[in-house]
């Protein structure tokens, strides 16, 4: 105990160091588990690189050569180690000072993470996890040290004994934290290497029969501000329940088609890509898309027709559904007719002319024109059981969503933007309208609740995609609201009755407020 009092500062510093590196390791593992591009330390390194003056960067590259990045990361780690030591020493006197040091480091990491293009709040999750780890670990390690110092013992009553016992507790806890940190670090490495391998495999894939997307000339109306008719993969909305995007090596992927069939089929990735490729522009949207929302995108999909595969398997006439299961355990029940009729329901292997991005279902996902994603567009699909709708329940239908999931007619105003100011006079309005597998016949707009006026609509290669629409309105100065409605082919005008997305998709007209000056 005396010895303990003689060098408590060193032990506190050690506590800070161990806690600090544990936090780094855990945040690194979290970044890789959540498939966030890189860990906070790398984000800081990238920021330093961006902020380094050209001459200095030049000097660094000259002197250090290809080692410049490892040296930078090592420098950051040394800086962090000093900060951790400091936090530990400060914790001896004041817990809040230690927390302030960790908070400052976390804030620095946060700025670096958010400074990257395309960063979202989710990218901060590893930092939050690391920060929490710092606090928990420092608390765990600090408690026995406090208990060992007699003048502070009352603060940490019951946390640990005194003297030698406190020292043992400290060492055991420090050992445990180190083991957890090493485990987290190894887990991170493992997740990272698997992911890199699959990313690399994906990039190197050359898929025969998959062609580059060609946007039909008449699809674009050329009005500024309307969402692009073709959605780049990077801008395509993402919906999945998986926390970590599955990383599946095509070599290891297979799909089993079984259930109410004459012969079970098991397909490997090679079997699949050796088949004839079908390609089409297909608009995909989410049932959770609210009126005017953006959970909808249009891509050029390439894959293998499901109707052919199901007919090879010999589907029983009593079946009316296919229960699709993803590698991540998510599932959905799809009406069989939508997979076997003449539409382009496919097992897609490529999006916009390239192997599917990991987050969009690599290596294989289902795409069914005319149905919402939650009943059809299974990503990372590995199992299809031919069955009866009455006999199954699936992820979203279990949670109160409709069983069939046909897409409802919808339209959206993209310009003018909500709340924007435009010059009074002739004002361009425009947006998108869709009703996949039925098609859009006409679109109308109305200013300030007045009469409906026809809009121009762009071309579409099939009824399975959205269309752009545009109109010019005479708008006097003042506050206005523009609304849009679409008419599906051979059907009615879109209803103005507002309904929530649950259970089978929202209805109602999209309206946008703007000011003309
Ligand atoms: N494995 C898996 N597939 C899934 C989902 C999911 O949560 N897990 N979500 C579905 C839903 S609700 C939609 S709208 C689409 C979205 O596809 P995207 O993320 O490629 O846009 O995927 C569908 N496929
Ligand atoms: Mo969805």
Image: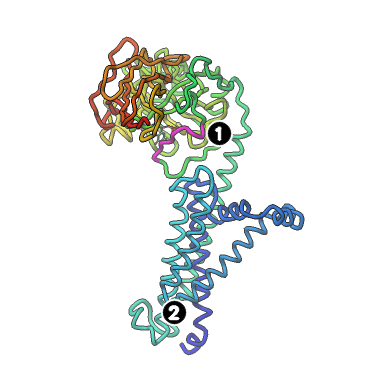
Q: Give how far across and how far down residue 494 sits, in percent.
A: 29, 19
Is 139 one of the magenta-colored residues?
no
* Res 422 label: none
Magenta stretch, main secondary structure, is loop
Query: In terms of secondary structure, where does tag 2 sit?
Result: helix
CA distance separating discs 2 and 1: 56 Å
Label tally:
2
Q: Circle 2 sits on which residue?
A: 93
Residue 223 higher or lower than 94, as above or below: above
Q: In the image, is 241 to the left or to the right of 179? A: left
Ligand 1 closer than 8 Å to label 1 CB: no
Dot 2 surroundings within 10 Å: few (below 14), some, or many (20 or more)?
few
Dot 1 surroundings within 10 Å: few (below 14), some, or many (20 or more)?
some
* N-term mark: 2 or 1: 2
Q: Give how far across and how far down residue 56 sits, in percent.
A: 70, 57
Query: In terms of secondary structure, where does tag 1 sit?
Result: helix
Q: Give the number of the mark in front: 2 or 1.
A: 2
For the residues bearing labels 2 and 1, Cβ distance under 8 angstroms: no
Q: Circle 1 sits on which residue?
A: 250
Residues in magenta, as a range: 233-241
Single out the residue that lies furthest toward the bottom.
Answer: 2
Quarter of the picture containing the C terminus is top left
Compare residues 491 and 480 and report the one nearer the observer: 480
């Amino acid at each position: 105990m005396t010895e303990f009092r003689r060098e408590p500062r060193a032990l506190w510093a050690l506590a800070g160091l161990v806690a600090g590196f544990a936090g780094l390791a855990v945040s690194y593992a979290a970044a890789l588990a959540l498939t966030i591009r890189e860990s906070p330390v790398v984000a800081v390194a990238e920021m330093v690189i961006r902020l380094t003056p050209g001459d200095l960067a030049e000097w660094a590259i000259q002197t250090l050569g290809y080692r410049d990045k490892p040296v930078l990361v090592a420098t950051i780690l040394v800086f962090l180690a000093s900060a951790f030591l400091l936090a530990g020493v400060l914790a001896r006197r004041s817990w809040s000072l230690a927390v302030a040091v960790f908070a400052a480091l976390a804030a620095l990491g946060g700025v670096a993470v958010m400074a990257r293009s395309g960063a979202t709040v989710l990218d901060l999750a590893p930092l939050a996890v690391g920060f929490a780890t710092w606090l928990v670990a420092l608390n765990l390690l600090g408690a026995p040290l406090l208990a060992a110092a007699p003048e502070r013992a009352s603060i940490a009553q019951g946390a640990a004994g005194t003297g030698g016992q406190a020292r043992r507790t400290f060492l055991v806890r420090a050992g445990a934290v180190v083991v957890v940190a090493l485990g987290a670090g190894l887990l991170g490495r493992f997740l990272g290497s698997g992911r890199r391998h699959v990313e690399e495999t994906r990039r190197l894939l050359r898929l025969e029969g998959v062609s580059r997307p060609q946007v039909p000339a008449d699809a674009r109306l050329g009005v500024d501000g309307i969402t692009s008719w073709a959605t780049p993969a990077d801008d395509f909305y993402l919906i999945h329940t998986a926390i970590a995007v599955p990383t599946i090596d095509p070599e290891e992927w297979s799909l089993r088609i079984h259930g109410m069939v004459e012969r079970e089929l098991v397909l490997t990735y090679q079997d699949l890509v050796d088949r004839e490729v079908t390609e089409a522009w297909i608009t995909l949207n989410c049932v959770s898309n609210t009126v005017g929302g953006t959970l909808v995108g249009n891509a050029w999909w390439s894959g293998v027709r499901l109707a052919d595969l199901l007919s090879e398997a010999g589907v029983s006439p009593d079946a009316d559904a296919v229960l699709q299961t993803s590698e991540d355990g998510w599932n959905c029940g799809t009406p069989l007719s939508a997979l076997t009729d003449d539409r382009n329901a496919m097992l897609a292997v490529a999006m916009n002319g390239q192997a599917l991005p990991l987050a969009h279902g690599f290596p294989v996902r289902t795409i069914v024109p005319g149905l919402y994603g939650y009943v059809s567009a299974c990503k990372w699909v590995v199992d299809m059981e031919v069955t009866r709708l009455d006999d199954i329940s699936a992820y979203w239908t279990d949670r109160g969503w409709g069983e069939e999931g046909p897409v409802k007619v919808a339209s959206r105003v993209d310009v003018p933007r909500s709340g924007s100011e435009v010059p009074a006079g002739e004002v361009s309005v425009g947006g998108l309208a869709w009703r996949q597998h039925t098609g859009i016949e006409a679109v109308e707009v109305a200013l300030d609740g007045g009469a409906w006026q026809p809009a121009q609509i762009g071309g579409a290669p099939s009824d399975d995609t959205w269309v752009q629409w545009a109109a010019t309105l005479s708008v006097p100065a003042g506050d206005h609201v523009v609304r849009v409605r679409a008419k599906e082919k051979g059907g009615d005008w879109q209803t103005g009755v507002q309904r929530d997305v649950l259970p089978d998709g929202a209805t109602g007209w999209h309206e946008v407020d703007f000011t003309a000056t």
